[in-house]
Amino acid sequence: MGGFLLRRIGQGLLVVIGVTLIVFIATRMVGDPVKVMLPLSATDAQRAAFAQQIGLDRPIGAQFVDFVGDMARLDFGESLWQRRPALDVVLERLPNTLKLIGAGLGLAILLSLPLGAIAALRPGGWVDRTTVFVGLFGLSLPQFWFGLLMIVFFAVTLGWLPTSGMGGARYYILPAITLALPSLARLVMLVRSSMIDELNQQYVRTARAKGLHFRRVVMVHAMRNTLVPFVTLAGWELISALAGYTVVVETVFAWPGLGLTAMQAIQKSDLFLLQAIVFIVAVLIVIINVGLDVIYKLIDPRIRLA
Amino acid sequence: MNISAMSNNEPLLEIDRLKVEFDTRRGLVQGLRGVTLSIGRGETLGVVGESGSGKSVTAQAVMGLIDMPGRIASGDIRWKGRSLLGADGERYARDIRGKEVAMVFQDPMTSLNPVLRVGTQIGEVLERHLGMTRKQARTRSEELLAAVGISAPGRRLDQHPHEFSGGMRQRVMIAMAIACEPQLLIADEPTTALDVTIQAQILELLAELQQSLGLSIVLITHDLGVVAGLCHRVAVMYAGQIIETGQAEDVFERPAHPYTQGLLRSTPRLDEVSDRLISIDGTPPNLVTPPDGCSFQQRCPLSGEACKKAPQLAHIRPDAEAACWQPSTPAWATPLMTPSISH
């Protein structure tokens, strides 16, 4: 276990370095911060002075050496847009994103297990067919559009919920549902098909022949085996949410999280902020992956950690 | 008519004209076509027959494991005189299954839950039926593992099935089955998936347990040697029906039904040199549209006009029954348990 963790941390480090290298190059290709930050009327001298101030006048190789050195000290430079350390901005916004993901993905995970299991008990029955239909619906609906529909209906027309922003519990409802829907659909489909498989396994017959209560056969015997693929997909959903879905949902609902901040950083060509965001997200994803491996091992002892 | 007439005590399990059907895409498959069977206390019954003859379906019906698209079409299953079918029966059945009647399955590799500890899987039976606490169940599970010949039982309880060999897993299955000291154990080809040397050990274990616990055993197998070694009585199944039944030795020495004769003749023997294995010509009938009359008539060397009518199980000797219009003792018949004298 100790060796496994060390190995995975080493691998994770390589991943983070690789990702930041790509971001370093990509951010320098998407836009010129000098052009964006300074007014059109700025003189060439002013532009040169600004470029020198943020270090963009130097050769790209030298910039990269500095960048890696700073990164090792967790110094990501100053956000051009907010005029304060980029890492501070990231750490201030990150909890908001994690809260949104917690609410959205938590909802998807909590609902998908019972819904999928109930559908699997009678494949082809009305619960099953309804679940599959709603699932396909959730899969095919574009997330941003679903979010907008919800705003129009529940916030504008009915006036029940706030349209956007972050505040008390009421502010969470629409963005969390929007974030949850496609994940919920995928998870339900997985739980359903996996449970149908497991309920036909020989060990389920054994459990039934033992006279166990039906509830225990389904919820303990079959469900425990379903958890292995379930954790794989749930982990993937978590990573996808962190690395992408929240950008869409936070933009639609003006949620002051990391995704929205990433959008703004791109618009403002704030490459230092963008680098900090990508670095933190990459680190989180590496941590999540190691955590998932440990959870696998806890659920299914046959899995070897290597 | 009832086979249990032979045993002097009240039968534990009675299966009465049981019919099971499976609604498949190819049509309605008649898995069991009127099976009548009973088991007395301490008795060992061997059920033999080829694949698809209905041996396992019979066991599954008793354990309530007939699933969609299968269903029990008619007949009855009674435990100590009380039906296990219908709404009342099912409630009763849930309490006796795993407690008074238990089952050991064919493939110990897939019959245990791979992600649950062995101790959990044995303990849950005790918690369910005997109301034990987790701690009591653990102590008892340890004793059970020891009883089925697993060493270091305390440590083994915390292991998962993949840490056990095939034979050891089957021992775990048996420990689970005898946890509540059942009166009847149904073993559905318990040794088929195991190595030959392990097979003997498992059969020995079953025989020992029968002695020490006074168990009745239904042993489903297609290994006639196993039946000869272990069973008091034998029932031969063909195409969803019992076609011959009687004392094991008697059936082996003087099989009356042509199918039983063919089955015995096609068992390869170690004490004879032969170039090729003997088989019964033809294949079993399609159970979607079973033939009118005797189901064996197409393959039977003796079939005649009479066989167009379905034969019922009838006494051919005081303690032997066969479903055949022309029961016979074949010329080749020799006692299975003694060396062959002529050929």
Image: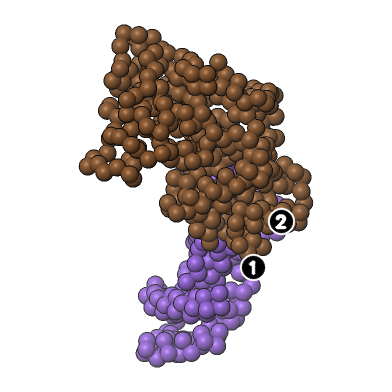
Chain colours: A purple, B brown
Task: Indicate the position of residue B2 as horizontal and vertical percent values.
Answer: 57, 19
A254 or A45, nearer to the observer: A254
The amino acid type, in three-letter code, at marker 2 is: Arg
Q: Chain of mark 1?
A: A
Task: Indicate the position of residue A16 as horizontal and vertical percent values.
Answer: 47, 77
Label 2 belongs to which residue?
B138
B68 or B62, nearer to the observer: B62
Judged from the image, the secondary structure of the residue bearing numbered disc 2 is: helix
Judged from the image, the secondary structure of the residue bearing numbered disc 1 is: helix
Left or right relative to B112: residue B139: right
Residue occupying the point 77% across, 45% down: B131
Label 2, label 1: how far apart the Cα atoms are: 45 Å
Left or right relative to A66: residue B74: right
- From where the camera sits, is residue A231 visible? no
Task: Indicate the position of residue B59 as horizontal and vertical percent values.
Answer: 54, 33
Which disc number belongs to residue A40?
none
Residue furthest left in the image: B275
Label 1 belongs to which residue?
A95
Task: Indicate the position of residue A27 as horizontal and vertical percent values.
Answer: 42, 75
Asked which quadrant contains residue B215, the reply is top right
Quadrant holding the N terminus of chain A: bottom right
Relative height, residue B339 to residue B1 (above, below)? below
Asked which quadrant contains residue A206, the reply is top right
